[in-house]
Image (cartoon, helix red, strand yellow):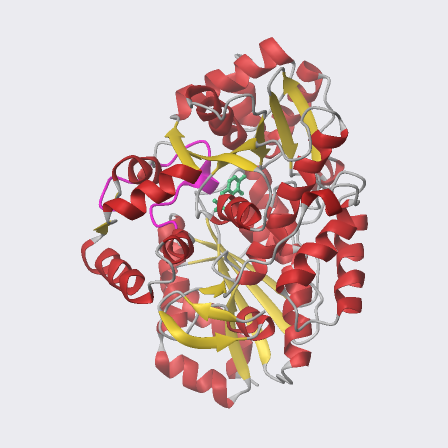
Amino acid sequence: MMFTSTRNNNLSVSAAQAILQGLSTEGGLFVPQQFPQLSVETVYQMDYCQMAEKVLGSFLTDYDPQFLQQAVKQVYGSAFGTKAGYVQQVNKNTWSLELWHGPTCAFKDYALQMMPKLLVQARTMLSSTDTTVILVATSGDTGKAALEGYRDLEGIRIKVFYPTGGTSEIQRLQMATQQGNNVEVYAVEGNFDAAQTGVKKVFADQAIGQLLKEKGVSLSSANSINWGRLVPQIVYYFYSYSQLVKQGVIALGNPVDFCVPTGNFGDILAGWYAKQMGLPVGKLICASNKNNVLSEFFATGVYNAKREFFKTTSPSMDILISSNLERLLYHVSGGNDTLVAELMDSLSKTGSYTLPKDLLEKIQQDFAAGWADDQQAADEIKHRWDTDGYLCDPHTAVAFRVAEQTAHTKDAPCVVLSTASPYKFPMAVLQALGCPVPQQDFEALRQLETFSGVQAPTQLKELEQKPQRFSKVILPSDIVKAATEEISAL
Ligand SMILES: *Cc1c(COP(=O)(O)O)cnc(C)c1O
């Protein structure tokens, strides 16, 4: 299987090259040149590891199958306990695919536990001797998941920058207490944009790039534009479908709808890939918060990022540029790299673009979309608890709400992707439930446990006692220095 760029069909690279490089040189994203077919009849009996081996193996054909078998065992066999791809029925027609039973309690673990292994292997396969420095600007979940995934890996260093005012206290402590000898965590004075802009500056600075090259260092990013982050996410669509078949909810071959809380469009796109591979998916329902660029796009074909940015209770979905949408545009246009390059150029120059009508109609066959604001998400948290006894976080609540408002495929059950543990956001969840909210996150966490009778994940409770290793607060203007610090001394 070879990969090409969404903006240049003449490129053809191996999976290892796509994963090591991340982004194509002209700015495009790497996409597979075919969709391998996977019949549900043959895979639905498999356990999670076997299924992951099958899906990863069908795209990463240049990787040693034995390596992949080992890697998936290490990740999905142990890091997720027994709950990789766990599906919980919520009410008559709705299931929750709980993707937060991994080490950092958010769905990003599925990709960020696996991708570092794929990257290290790619370095070996391509005989790369550079030190890889991963730079991450994060509003919360990505930073911690990346730190856990990349810690103590040989030849790799990781530096994470988070905004002082942008994360929940629990999210902050998850990063400030991080273990590992190749990790660095910085709080940046300001909001997420300040951190993000600072990190982008490092990537774009040619003088720095040259200096790093001379020292044998290459920079890389951990965000979801890398193919290595997308492919592990395809697995749980197949797996959850299979669970519904095994439980007798659907007959093999009948459709299932999936509703996905969406930010950068990575998670939901993995579902679209699953459909192209042969999974009987009805509608993919794209759920946004008040930053509703995507639901507008699916309704009108106009992608307009020139709008007010809202900070919401679902911060991991506070995104105006959903990078992975570019991959969908490429595929539905039949691989029209010229069109994709034009649209992306328009987006970066004018902040918007308009999709040709025939392509919009094509997309609308597969996707539905909607959005919910903070109040609606809070109402939904309370409603799900009161009527179904089911506790969910604000991101998942957005998806439940949108799933309810949206027309479904006839007779199809709906699987909602639950992307974070409610205990990562105990203040917001307690408040939504109508409880008095204490001053402190761990107090809120305990009260939420008492209220709901649902235990919080141990790794979150333990944070309260863990020593904080990283307390440095820097100015946005110091990010370049922090990113290159010990490298200049090499
Ligand atoms: C990252 C994240 C999302 C959005 O996923 P995308 O792949 O960026 O669309 C949703 N919920 C949570 C909790 C997340 O961390």
Relative image position of residue 430 (x, y in whole percent):
56, 20
Residue 91 position (above or below residue 57): above
Which residue in the rendered view is the most extreme toward the top? 387
Residue 218 position (above or below residue 47): below
State whether residue 439 appears in this view. Answer: no
Relative image position of residue 334 (x, y in whole percent):
38, 58
Is residue 416 shown left or right of residue 178? left
Which residue in the rendered view is the most extreme toward the left? 350
Residue at 69% x, 24% y is 249
The range drawn in magenta is 303-322
Relative image position of residue 122 (x, y in whole percent):
64, 74
State which quarter of the image contains the N terminus. bottom right
The reply to whether the magenta stretch includes residue 308 is yes
State whether residue 21 appears in this view. Answer: yes
Residue 182 position (above or below residue 389): below
Q: Quadrant of residue 156?
A: bottom right
| Magenta stretch: dominant secondary structure | loop
Relative image position of residue 56 (x, y in whole percent):
67, 59
Q: Quadrant of residue 346?
A: bottom left
The reply to whether the magenta stretch includes residue 55 is no
Residue at 56% x, 45% y is 172
Residue at 66% x, 69% y is 61
Number of labelled discs?
Answer: 0
Is residue 28 shown left or right of residue 246? left
Give whichever of 362, 125 is nearer the camera: 362
Q: Quadrant of residue 230?
A: bottom right
Residue at 55% x, 77% y is 486
Is residue 198 shown left or right of residue 242? left
State which quarter of the image contains the C terminus. bottom right
